[in-house]
Image (tube, grey):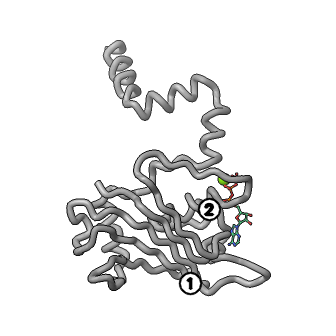
Amino acid sequence: MVTLEKIELKNFKSFKKLSLDVPKGFTAIVGPNGSGKSNIVDAILFVLGKTSAKKLRANRFSGLITYHNGKRADFAEVCLYFSNENNAFNVNAERVGILRRIKSSGETDYYLIWKENDKEKRKKMAKHEIIDLFRRLGLLGDNVISQGDLLKIINISPIERRKIIDEISGISEFDEKKKKAEEE
Ligand code: ATP
Ligand code: MG
């Protein structure tokens, strides 16, 4: 399994430039309200292929690009660097980056980034190649619980919450089977 080692942002939302090492194990990002914690999660989801601006908490896709002093930057880039375990990326490097770039038109492109003989290599990837790669690496970004979701789970009734836990753990399936058997 590949692991996330580093996140780099350029002109993404509130960050002009950010480089963040992700150490092995459990990572927490702390900071005051509005300091950009959720923006970092949005950046990760942006690379993992979210196609809806709303899911990334922006009105339109180009809204993801830094807006500062009444001006929007020309582009934004987010790069996620992963360990190249078992040569999962099929390139000769220990660490490989998946970079998604967005222009002010809202158009986005994907690149693979790695170092060979100390030189940075960049390969543009077609959409279907990136989808194949994500599928192969198991990087689907669908196991993210966002800020609002957690509050929803806290505020629902215990019965509703139990239903969700049963669903996730696979118990619901047996409840249904039991009910059917009792009816027969
Ligand atoms: P909380 O603790 O309240 O959840 P947070 O640390 O998660 O806060 P974020 O929601 O990540 O904070 O950051 C919100 C900030 O990002 C706001 O100040 C908002 O103005 C800023 N922001 C969002 N999009 C852009 C953009 N395109 N350009 C500049 N700033 C932006
Ligand atoms: Mg937040």
Packing grade of label 1 (10 A; few <14, some 14-19, many >=20) is some
Residue mark closest to the camera, 1 vs 2: 2
Q: What residue type is labelled 1?
A: Lys
Instruction: Give me the C-alpha separation between circle 1 and circle 2.
Output: 18 Å
Quarter the C terminus occupies:
top left
Q: Note whether residue 61 is visible.
A: no
**Is 101 placed left or right of 87 in the picture?**
right
**Is 177 placed left or right of 18 in the picture?**
left
The residue closer to the viewer here, 177 or 15, is 15
In the rendered structure, are the residues bearing label 1 and label 2 in contact, judged by CB atoms less than 8 Å apart?
A: no
Packing grade of label 2 (10 A; few <14, some 14-19, many >=20) is some
**Is 61 placed left or right of 88 in the picture?**
right
Q: On the image, numbered disc 1 is attached to which residue? A: 103
**Labelled disc at residue 39:** 2
Quarter the N terminus occupies:
bottom left
Q: Note whether residue 26 is visible.
A: yes
SS class of the residue under badge 1?
strand
Is the CB of the residue bearing disc 2 within 8 angstroms of ligand 1? yes
For the image, the number of numbered tags is 2
- Residue drawn at the location 55% of the way across and 72% of the way down: 9
SS class of the residue under badge 2?
helix
The residue closer to the viewer here, 111 or 158, is 111
Q: What residue type is labelled 2?
A: Asn
Q: Position of residue 176 (x, y in %)?
A: 38, 24
